[in-house]
Image (tube, rainbow, N blue to C red):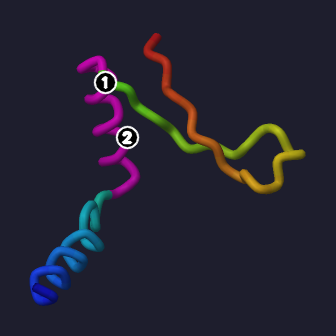
Amino acid sequence: MSETLNKRRSSMRTHRFGVGQYDKLINKLNALRKGKRVMETIRNPDLKQTNKPFIRVQIERS
């Protein structure tokens, strides 16, 4: 049992390993084109929320 757990945990760590910045952008654009909900992580514009330095916002399709 623990042998399969270690294999799964190891494969989860390498998931998306080697995916570059441009590949992520292409994947997001393809998902937007298909009409899927795509999220982007940005810095929080409200500087008073020190417990949340980054927030996730949905990308609007224009």
Residue 25 falls inside the magenta stretch: yes
Task: Report the amino acid beneath label 1.
Answer: Lys
Q: Residue 37: where, in percent of width, then height? A: 38, 26
Give the quarter of the image for residue 2: bottom left
Q: Nearer the viewer, residue 55 or 6?
A: 6
**Chief secondary structure of the magenta portion:** helix
Give the labeled residue for mark 2.
25
Give the quarter of the image for residue 13: bottom left
Q: Residue 32: where, in percent of width, then height? A: 33, 23
Report the residue that reaches farthest toward the right.
48
Residue 7 falls inside the magenta stretch: no
Q: Nearer the viewer, residue 45 or 20?
A: 45
Task: Report the amino acid beneath label 2.
Answer: Leu
Tag on residue 36? 1
Q: Residue 36: where, in percent of width, then height? A: 31, 24
Image position of 30 with respect to 5: above or below: above
Side of 56 where 12 appears, left or right: left
Tell me the crowding category of disc 2: few under 14, some 14 to 19, or many 20 or more residues within 10 angstroms, Cα based. Answer: few
Helix, strand or loop at label 2? It is helix
Q: Which residues are magenta?
A: 20-35
Of circles 2 and 1, the one toward us is 1
- The total of numbered circles placed on residues is 2
Report the residue that reaches farthest toward the front.
1
Side of 55 where 3 appears, left or right: left
Tell me the residue at 69%/46% (across/down).
43
Q: Nearer the viewer, residue 5 or 55?
A: 5
Report the residue that reaches farthest toward the top.
62
Q: Nearer the viewer, residue 17 or 52?
A: 52
Helix, strand or loop at label 1? It is loop
- Distance Cα–Cα, label 2 vs label 1: 14 Å
Tell me the residue at 33%/29% (across/down).
29
Question: Dividing the image into 4 quarters, which one contains the N terminus?
Answer: bottom left
